[in-house]
Image: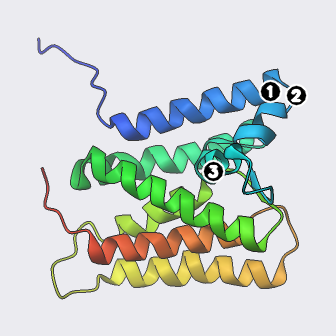
């Protein structure tokens, strides 16, 4: 009988999910104070060092269990294949850059943001590039852009809810940029 081994297959993705869970629990334990202080981006003084922490930390914060689960299920579905294709170090940089860009856009133009949805949308769009060859644009990429990003643009124009469509759009655009610029074969 062959032995079954459990493998920590995507260290960046799994660590991200675990850190997000810790942030959620810490937020619950402090009645939201930790979430506001470290895991949300909002307009604050640039002289406050925590403002810069929040530019990145907001992707770990979630408003509740349902928000966390919605993001983590997609992250855990799409992320491991991307980490295998691009490598752990590249995934860290892609996540960090997406966090920074979505954080800055929301800091400048909108009142507040928290959650990993920008990172998740980056990964959804980036995953459309997994089978791409040089000089080709996959049909799956075109469909993802039309359905996901197009849907977010429409929702942003016509819906009034607490969902940050701009984070989804900016995350998706980051995925497009990464897909066209970061080329790496399977490891």
Answer above or below: position of 122 versus 79: below
Marks 2 and 1, how far apart at CA: 5 Å
Which residue does the numbered mark 3 point to in the structure image?
Answer: 52
Answer above or below: position of 163 versus 84: below
Q: Residue at x 84, y 76 (%)?
A: 159
Marks 1 and 3, how far apart at CA: 23 Å
For the N terminus, the quadrant is top left
Q: Residue at x 38, y 48 (%)?
A: 92
- Label 3 SS: helix
Marks 2 and 3, how far apart at CA: 23 Å
Report the label total.
3
- Label 2 SS: loop
- Front position among marks 2 and 3: 3
Label 3: few (<14), some (14–19) or many (≥20) C-alpha neighbours in 10 Å: some
Name the side, left or right, on which 133 lies relative to 96: left
Of 64 and 97, nearer the camera is 97
Quarter of the image for residue 2 reads: top left
Label 2: few (<14), some (14–19) or many (≥20) C-alpha neighbours in 10 Å: few
Res 31 label: 2
Which residue does the numbered mark 1 point to in the structure image?
Answer: 28
Of 120 and 45, nearer the camera is 45
Name the side, left or right, on which 39 lies relative to 132: right
Give x and y (percent) for residue 82.
31, 54
N-term mark: 2 or 3 = 2
Residue that lies at the very extreme toward the front in this rendered image:
47
Name the side, left or right, on which 84 lies relative to 165: left
Instruction: Please say if the residues under marks 2 and 1 sit with CB atoms less than 8 Å apart.
Output: yes
Quarter of the image for residue 6 reads: top left
Q: Residue at x 73, y 64 (%)?
A: 107
Answer above or below: position of 120 versus 37: below
Give x and y (percent) for residue 177.
39, 76
N-term mark: 1 or 3 = 1
């Amino acid at each position: 009988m062959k032995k079954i081994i459990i493998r920590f297959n995507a260290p960046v993705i799994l660590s991200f999910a675990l850190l997000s869970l810790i942030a959620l629990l810490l937020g619950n334990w402090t009645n939201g104070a930790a979430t506001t202080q470290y895991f949300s981006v909002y307009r604050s003084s640039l002289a406050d060092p925590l403002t810069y922490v929040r530019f990145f930390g907001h992707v770990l914060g979630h408003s509740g269990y349902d928000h966390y689960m919605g993001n983590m299920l997609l992250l855990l579905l799409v992320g491991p294949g991307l980490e295998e294709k691009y490598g752990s170090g590249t995934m860290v940089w892609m996540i960090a850059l997406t966090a920074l860009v979505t954080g800055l856009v929301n800091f400048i133009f909108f009142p507040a943001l928290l959650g990993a949805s920008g990172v998740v949308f980056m990964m959804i769009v980036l995953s459309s590039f997994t089978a791409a060859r040089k000089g080709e644009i996959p049909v799956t990429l075109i469909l993802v852009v039309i359905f996901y990003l197009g849907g977010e643009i429409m929702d942003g124009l016509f819906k009034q809810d607490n969902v940050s469509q701009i984070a989804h759009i900016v995350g998706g655009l980051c995925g497009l940029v990464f897909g066209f610029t970061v080329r790496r074969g399977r490891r």
